[in-house]
């Protein structure tokens, strides 16, 4: 069992962590003002490191600060104290090296599939020639099997197709890290299963750091290298980190025939159930 990382305090020791860990979240606290005058602490002393090609899943009950943590890593919100470092550099604002995929599709309805992806490429990859940008867009639409739908508008697409556009748009600018906030949460079970596999296929061919929020334990075990389990908020912190022992690529059917899979699943569900009982109590 892997517990949450506690980072050493000396500057020289911390520098070693930054050189060996792609993303380092150091003593992070996030608090908001409240009507009573006492701040409400959402996240309390979060410490976590993520490898350059590691797939991390974060699970926990609603209100535990999962999305807030992801937004801080994305630079969309600032920590109250502590810091987040990417390759040793502090994260202070959004950057093209970190791209987010949300549960809401966030597509511009007046642009086609191709144009939605091209907009991001034009913004970030402005040093490429127009031809190279077009090729980049076409390559990533092909990755998510949307070449035939390139000229369609968002209102002509299913939910799964819209999410694939969002994923293609995020990947097309070649980020170092992909941040996903319940990317499959709004999809039906069959579409969700297919898109999980498709995202893993892409990640296995083009490894990068991924941090994904999910409420689905099975999804976390199927996709992630480690599962970060959050305690309830307020004052949420990392309760436990589970290492997923299965190598990629993974076969969903084979996993479910493994006793190790069920042991891991039951452990994660037991953790969540214990905090659900606290909420109910």
Image: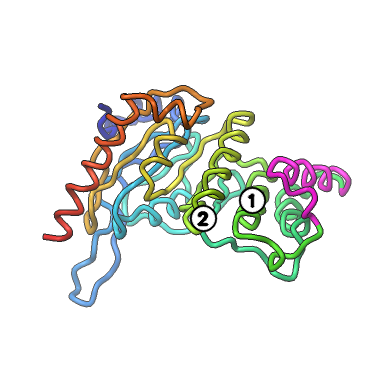
> Dot 1, crowdedness within 10 Å: few (<14), some or many (≥20)?
many
Q: In the image, 74: left or right of 60?
A: right
Residue at numbered disc 1: 164
Q: Which of marks 2 and 1 is in front?
A: 2
Name the N-terminal-most of marks 2 and 1.
Answer: 1
The residue that mark 2 highlights is 188
Residue 152 image position (x, y, % from top left) = 77, 61
Q: Point out the residue furthest to the left here.
A: 281
Quadrant of res 138: top right
Residue ID at (22%, 77%): 35
Above or below, comparing residue 169 to residue 263 in the picture: below
| Residue at figure coordinates x 84%, y 42% from the top left | 132
* Magenta segment, prevailing SS (helix, strand or loop): helix
Which residues lie in the magenta part?
A: 130-150
Q: How far apart are marks 2 and 1 (CA)?
A: 14 Å
Residue in front for this viewpoint, 92 or 182: 182
Q: Is residue 34 above or below residue 44?
A: below
Is 144 inside the magenta-drawn segment?
Answer: yes
Q: How crowded is mark 2: few (under 14 residues within 10 Å), some or many (20 or more)?
A: few
**Quadrant in which the N terminus is drawn:** top left
Q: Horizontal placement of 271 versus 124: left or right?
A: left
Q: Helix or strand or loop: what does disc 2 sit on?
A: loop
Q: Using the image, tell me which numbered label, if any, was put on residue 192.
A: none
Q: In which quarter of the image is residue 8?
A: top left
> On the rendered structure, is 165 left or right of 30?
right
In the foreground, 100 or 141: 141
Which x, y percent locates residue 23?
Answer: 45, 36
Residue 241 vs residue 221, the one in the foreground: 221
Q: Residue at x 61, y 42 (%)?
A: 175
């Amino acid at each position: 069992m892997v517990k949450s990382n506690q980072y050493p305090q000396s500057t020289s020791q911390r520098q070693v962590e930054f050189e060996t860990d792609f993303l380092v979240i150091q003593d992070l606290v996030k608090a908001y003002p409240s009507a009573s005058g006492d701040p409400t602490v959402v996240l309390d002393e979060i410490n976590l490191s993520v490898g350059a090609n590691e797939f991390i899943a974060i699970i926990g009950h609603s209100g535990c600060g999962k999305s807030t943590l992801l937004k801080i890593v994305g630079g969309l919100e600032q920590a109250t104290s502590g810091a987040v470092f990417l390759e040793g550099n502090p994260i202070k604002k959004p950057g093209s090296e970190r791209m987010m995929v949300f549960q809401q599709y966030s597509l511009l309805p007046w642009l086609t599939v191709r144009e939605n992806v091209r907009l991001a490429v034009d913004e970030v990859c402005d040093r490429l020639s127009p031809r190279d940008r077009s090729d980049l867009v076409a390559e990533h639409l092909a990755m998510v099997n949307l070449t035939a739908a390139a000229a369609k508008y968002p209102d002509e697409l299913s939910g799964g197709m819209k999410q694939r556009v969002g994923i293609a748009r995020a990947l097309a600018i070649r980020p170092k890290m992909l941040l996903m906030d319940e990317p499959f949460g709004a999809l039906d079970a069959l579409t969700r299963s297919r898109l999980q596999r498709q995202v893993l296929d892409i990640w296995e061919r083009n490894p990068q750091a991924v941090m994904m929020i999910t409420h689905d334990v099975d999804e976390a075990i199927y996709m992630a290298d480690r599962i970060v389990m959050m305690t309830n908020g307020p004052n949420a912190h990392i309760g436990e980190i589970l290492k997923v022992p299965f190598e990629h690529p993974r076969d969903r059917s084979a996993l479910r025939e493994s006793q190790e899979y069920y042991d891991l699943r039951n452990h994660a569900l037991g953790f969540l159930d214990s905090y659900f009982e606290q909420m109910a109590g």
